[in-house]
Every structure is written in structure tokens, then in C-alpha cells.
Image (spheres, rainbow, N blue to C red):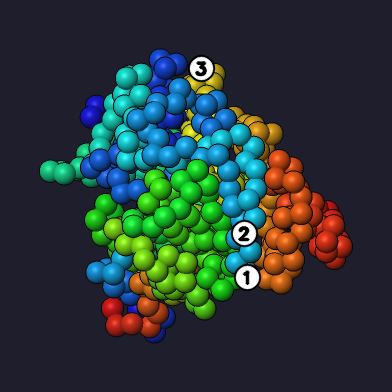
Amino acid sequence: MKKQYDIAVVGAGPAGSMAARTAAQSGADVLLMEKDLHPGMPVRCAEGVAEDALQNLVDIDEKWVLQRIRGAELIAPDGTRVMAKEEGGGYILDRRIFDRALADMAVAAGADLQAGTFASGMKRQKDGTWKISAEQPGGSAEVAARLVIGADGVESRVGRWAGIDTALRPQDIESCYQYVVEGIHIDPGLLQFYVTREFAPGGYAWVFPRSETSANIGLGVLGTYVKQVNPARSLRAFMDRYFPRGTVVSQRAGGVPVIPGLDRMTAAGVLLAGDAARQVDPISGGGITLGMYGGRMAAQHSIRALEQHDTSAENLAALRREWDKYTGRQHRVSLKLRNVIDNTADSVFNDLAVKMLKIPLHRRTYFSFFRTMLVSKPGLLLAVARSMF
Amino acid sequence: MTQNNIVIKTDNCDLCGTCVAVCPADAIVLYRDRIQVLHDQCTGCGRCVAVCPLAVPVQGGAP
């Protein structure tokens, strides 16, 4: 590790590696710090990704792919199953391999990857640069950077050090638990989404196939319900109900932000990306490709700011406006829809599932799901309309 | 130190960082292999207790 860089990226997940790669490709001198010893581990993710979104960001390598996905199945609270058409296909990735490959791409572009390097704090210097305290096995060091990109995950502290309020309220985060399960029999091409207030209030349970006999099975409970429904205990009960013969080979906890991005994603000399910026879809909780997009966008704004010799908060704030154009506005609507779903009784979802089954499969899209819900319950339409204004 | 003092039983902790994300006081630090409450910064608000998927933080425990 050198003493000084143009850009220091904290965190080598998909957002950080994408940021480091993009910045290094533009000729910047880039440090990529990762607290874990091996980028990509541990995996704290359901690993699902849409093909078109990923394609727009990188050339897809089959080695990352555990399973190809062709559709999804929604399971109503009473167990009614509705197959839904996916817009395009998707993948279940092996994040251990995928994250490592993205980090390697950043290195190939010229970034200096330092794994096992924990950023413990940072201070702004008189000349406007940031000095980061880094702890590494065998000792600590200080490193200076003109810009810092915080891609340090849901537990991000980089933003806080720069004075950005990143703290989420309990209603802003899904508290999740997930198993890797073997010894089950599932359709490997179908994602399964369980709408279930019993097991996952304010969230949902998922079965993302890794093969015909194994899957990532998990659930998310909105923070406000965790005291009543503990995610780890609830997942055990969910398994007993739906996959009693499955073998749990590993398990992990995780937190997923469900807000439409932070109001402020930048400060003087600092940009946030990925989970750190809360760049996650507020309905699905999906964030792999959104984070990568956010990382790339943060790098592009960094390069622009360095070229303009202006790393001020005002100049970097353009990032938030661009994010808004890209997806922020859409996510704000999604969040309102999510709140409506959260306030919808189980019986409504059961009715909805039966109605959906009457729609021909090729027309059963995400959109038709909501349309059917709104038409079948005019009260919901009012609620949505109210929430839009 | 107050009676709202947050204690994290680290042997059950999976180091997911959900508590860090909700802490309004920047009082929880997630290292690679451990988690630590900064007691001089902790206000005892209990948000971490409310959201932890494993019920690891406890309010009112002995420090």
C-alpha cells in the first residue's frame, strides 16, 4: 500500500470493485480496501440478479453462475401458488466467485487491492484530502486520498465520518436470515417468493435455487416487527412448514436497506455507493446490479471532480441528481407501493393469487400483479393514489 | 453508563452489521472478526436491539 492515492475505495463488494475498476480505467491512481481477507466472503446475499441489468454492466462469465432462472412463483399466505412471467431471465450467482472476479477486474485495470485492510476512521486535511486510518494484519497505517468512495456496505461508517446521516430507522431495514439448504427437490429455474405475514411480516420469504436439490432459503422481517417475529427463529419454523426434509448446510444473518437511496450520497471529498448509499430496490431488496451501477456512477463523478480540480460537496452533489434520474424516482414510488402491500391483509393476497391464476401465464407480469391487486381492491387504489401525492 | 446500557453477546453474533446500520450515534464498530459497542457514545436508544436478526444486543445488561 502506498501513502497516497487519487481515490480510495472502501469495500471490495460489487459496488466498490466496480467503482475501483471504472476509476482505474480512466487513469486514476486507485486504492481498493477490503476488510475481509478474501473479497466475496462471507456471502451475505440471496445471489439473484436479472440478466439484462448485469449484461449492461459486465461481460457475464458462466463461471459466476450457479443457476439460470426463467421465471418466478408467488406463494400466497394460504399456499396458493402462482407462476409469474419474468421480464427476461436471471441468474443465481456464486458471490464468492463473482465478487472475486469483479475485484480482479479492478486490479487488472490498475487498482491496488488491499484485502484484510480495515478502515477504522478518517480525517479531512487542510489541503482538502482525506487521511484514512487503516488496520492490517501485522500493523496499522495511514493513507491519504483526494477522494474517498465509501462502498462499505450496510454497516457503512465512511459516510458518518464525512458528516452524512446514514442511520436507518427500524422501518427502513429488513432484518434477514438465510440458509443454504440441500436435500430438497425444486424446479431449479424458478424463484419462489412467499408472501407471508406469519413468517416474514413487512418482508417476504425466498427460495432461490442453486440446483435441483439446493437453494438459498431465507426471509426478511421489517425492523419494526423483529421483536414479535425473530428472523432466525422464524426461518426455522418456515423450513419445518415447507422444507422439513432439507438439510441446512450453512446460515447467515443480514440487513437489507429498503429506502430509495440516501437523501445525501456525497460530502466534500466523499461519495457513497451500493448498500452504503442505500442503493437497493425497496420492494425486492435486490442490490447487486444497483450497487454496481452506483459504484460506476460514483467513479465517474470522482473522475469528473478530479479533472475539474473541485472535490467540494457542491460539485459532488450532482451524483444524487443523476441517481434520481436513473432510478431514485422509481424507487420512491416502489417504496410507497411496498407500504401499501405491508398494510394489506393476508386474505387480499389469497384472493389475488386466485385472480392471477385466471390470467394467461404469458400475461402474468409484475405489473399485472399490481393491476389485479388494485382492480380487485378499489380501496388499495385510493391508498396508492394518496401515497403518490 | 446507564441502565439502558447495550451489551452485545458476541459469541452469538454473525457480524452482519444490521445494528451498525441503525445506530444513530455511530456507537457500534464492526471489525472483521468482532463487534464492539462504544459505551461513551451509546445513548441506549435500543434501535440495535429492535432490529438484530439474532437478538444479540441486550438492553440493560451489565457492562
Asked whether the residues under marks 1 and 2 belong to the same chain, the reply is yes
Residue shown at 56% from the left, 56% from the top: A193
At x 36% / y 62%, what residue is drawn? A246
Which chain contains the residue that carries disc 1? Answer: A
Please state which of the two labelled residues, at mark 3 or mark 2, is closer to the viewer: 2
Q: Is residue A10 visible?
A: no
Instruction: Check disc 1 and report its element: helix, strand or loop.
Output: loop
Q: Is residue A312 above or below residue B29?
A: above
The residue under label 1 is A78
Q: Chain of mark 3?
A: A
Q: Amino acid at mark 1?
A: Asp
Residue of label 2: A81
Q: Would residue A338 appear left or right of A232 to someone viewing this image?
A: right
Secondary element at image label 2: strand
In space, the residues marked 3 and 1 are separated at their CA atoms by 58 Å
Label 2 chain ID:
A
Say which amino acid is labelled 3.
Glu
Q: Position of residue A27 (x, y in %)?
A: 40, 15
Q: Tag 3, which secondary structure? A: helix
Q: Residue at x 28, y 69 (%)?
A: B12
> Where is residue B32 shown, x and y percent of the image?
27, 52
Crowdedness near tag 1: few (<14), some (14–19) or many (≥20) residues, C-alpha within 10 Å:
some
Q: Decide which of A18, A130 is in the foreground and name it.
A: A18
- Which kind of residue does numbered mark 2 sit on? Arg
Q: CA distance from mark 3 to mark 2?
A: 54 Å
Q: Nearer the viewer, residue A389 or A59?
A: A59
Answer above or below: position of B14 versus A97. Answer: below
**Residue ID at (65%, 48%):** A84
- Up the image or down, A320 lies above or below A338; here it is above
Where residue A358 sits, quadrant-wise, is bottom right
Q: Which mark is residue A307?
A: 3
